[in-house]
């Protein structure tokens, strides 16, 4: 019994070994079928140190790339600077940019601004000049704002008005002095403004609206030309024309009256002459046959007019 049982156990072990070898063959065949053309062969042994280091570096580079992509430009810059200082040494002050040569838009406009732009100034325009020209086009150039703080030295500063000043009425309905806001007694002045700009001397004719005190400051050394409104000029012209017309009408009326008087006097004189002639005729008829008629000097009509006007103008 014992011998028979031992034989059975040996037989079963052989069967188990055969089945395991078949399974291995199947898995190897399956692996060959499922293997991709670009897939590397699996190393059954322990991986070499160089291969392991390459795999580790590749994973670290992938993680670092994802980390950098998640940052913005400033964070990446600070990280690189910190890494450089950590590995090579140094200070953060060495990496700080100097701001001595920095310029804002207003600095660029101040450097390239012109009180008046000519065709020659618009030649060879760069971006700085274009920016200054764009600012100049937005200014309002009817009236100026003046700085009269140095009027005793005969030095004045003028600039054009901006949109806020036009809306508030500064320079037109308020005094055009920079430090004055009076609204009463404003007078308009025309000034020949001479200035030096970019090493070139220029002149410009500008208009100002100033109160009485500021007008005194403007005309401290010599009087400028005052600009009067057209309405006033038209009124003065109308008054002069009306007075001239009245004088002409009065003179015409006077001459007409004189003519009427002269005509009436002439009519009276003619009537008296006719009466005298009638009386003379009546007397002459009675005296016709007494003797020859006496000779009388008859005056012409022109001589009678001359005598009449001489009596008038005496």
Image (cartoon, rainbow, N blue to C red):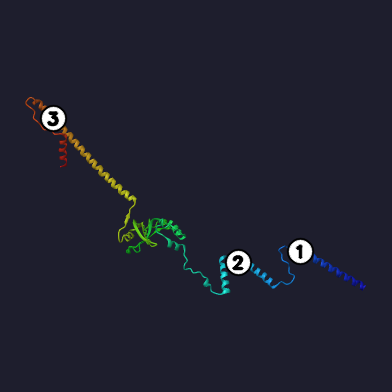
**Mark 3 or mark 1: which is in front?**
1
Q: Are marks 2 and 3 in contact (CB under 8 Å)?
A: no
Against 70, residue 185 (above or below) is above
Q: Does dot 3 land on a helix, a strand or a loop?
A: helix
Q: Residues within 10 Å of mark 1 (few under 14, many from 20)?
A: few
**Mark 2 or mark 3: which is in front?**
2
Against 117, residue 28 (above or below) is below
Q: Earlier in the sequence, mark 2 or mark 3?
A: 2
> To which quarter of the image does residue 23 belong?
bottom right
Q: Which mark is residue 68?
A: 2
Find residue 219 and report its horizontal and vertical position in percent.
31, 60
User: Is 103 or 220 nearer to us in this picture?
Assistant: 103
**Residue ID for mark 3:** 277
**Residue ID for mark 1:** 32
> To which quarter of the image does residue 75 belong?
bottom right
Q: CA distance from mark 3 to mark 1?
A: 170 Å
User: Is 312 or 203 nearer to us in this picture?
Assistant: 203
Q: What is the quadrant of the N terminus in the image? A: bottom right
Residue found 57% across the figure and 69% down from its top: 80
Q: CA distance from mark 2 to mark 3?
A: 141 Å
Q: Earlier in the sequence, mark 1 or mark 2?
A: 1
Residue sitting farthest toward the left: 290
Q: Does dot 1 land on a helix, a strand or a loop?
A: helix
Q: Are marks 3 and 1 in contact (CB under 8 Å)?
A: no
Against 118, residue 87 (above or below) is below
Q: Does dot 2 land on a helix, a strand or a loop?
A: helix
Residue found 17% across the figure and 35% down from its top: 266
> To which quarter of the image does residue 289 belong?
top left
Q: CA distance from mark 1 to mark 2?
A: 40 Å
């Amino acid at each position: 019994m014992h011998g028979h049982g031992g034989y059975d156990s040996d037989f079963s072990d052989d069967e188990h070994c055969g089945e395991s070898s078949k399974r291995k063959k199947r898995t190897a065949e399956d692996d060959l079928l499922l293997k991709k053309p670009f897939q590397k062969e699996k190393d059954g042994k322990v991986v070499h140190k160089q291969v392991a280091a390459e795999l580790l570096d590749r994973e670290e580079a992938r993680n670092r790339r994802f980390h950098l992509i998640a940052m913005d430009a400033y964070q990446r810059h600070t990280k690189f600077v910190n890494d450089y200082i950590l590995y090579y040494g140094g200070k953060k002050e060495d990496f700080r940019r100097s701001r001595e040569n920095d310029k804002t838009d207003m600095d660029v406009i101040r450097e390239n601004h012109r009180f008046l732009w000519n065709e020659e100034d618009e030649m060879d325009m760069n971006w700085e000049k274009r920016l200054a020209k764009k600012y100049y086009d937005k200014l309002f150039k009817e009236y100026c704002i003046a700085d009269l703080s140095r009027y005793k030295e005969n030095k004045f500063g003028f600039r054009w008005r901006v949109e806020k000043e036009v809306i508030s009425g500064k320079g037109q309905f308020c005094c055009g002095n920079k430090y004055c806001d009076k609204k009463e007694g404003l007078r308009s002045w025309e000034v020949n403004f001479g200035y030096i700009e970019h090493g070139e001397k220029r002149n410009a004719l500008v208009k100002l609206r100033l109160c009485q005190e500021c007008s005194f400051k403007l005309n401290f050394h010599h009087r400028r030309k005052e600009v009067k409104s057209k309405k006033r000029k038209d009124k003065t012209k109308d008054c002069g024309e009306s007075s001239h017309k009245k004088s002409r009408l009065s003179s015409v009326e006077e001459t007409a009256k004189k003519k009427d008087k002269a005509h009436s006097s002439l009519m009276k004189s003619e009537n008296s002459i006719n009466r005298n002639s009638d009386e003379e005729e009546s007397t002459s008829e009675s005296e016709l046959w007494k003797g020859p008629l006496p000779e009388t000097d008859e005056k012409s009509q022109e001589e009678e007019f001359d005598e009449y006007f001489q009596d008038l103008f005496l």
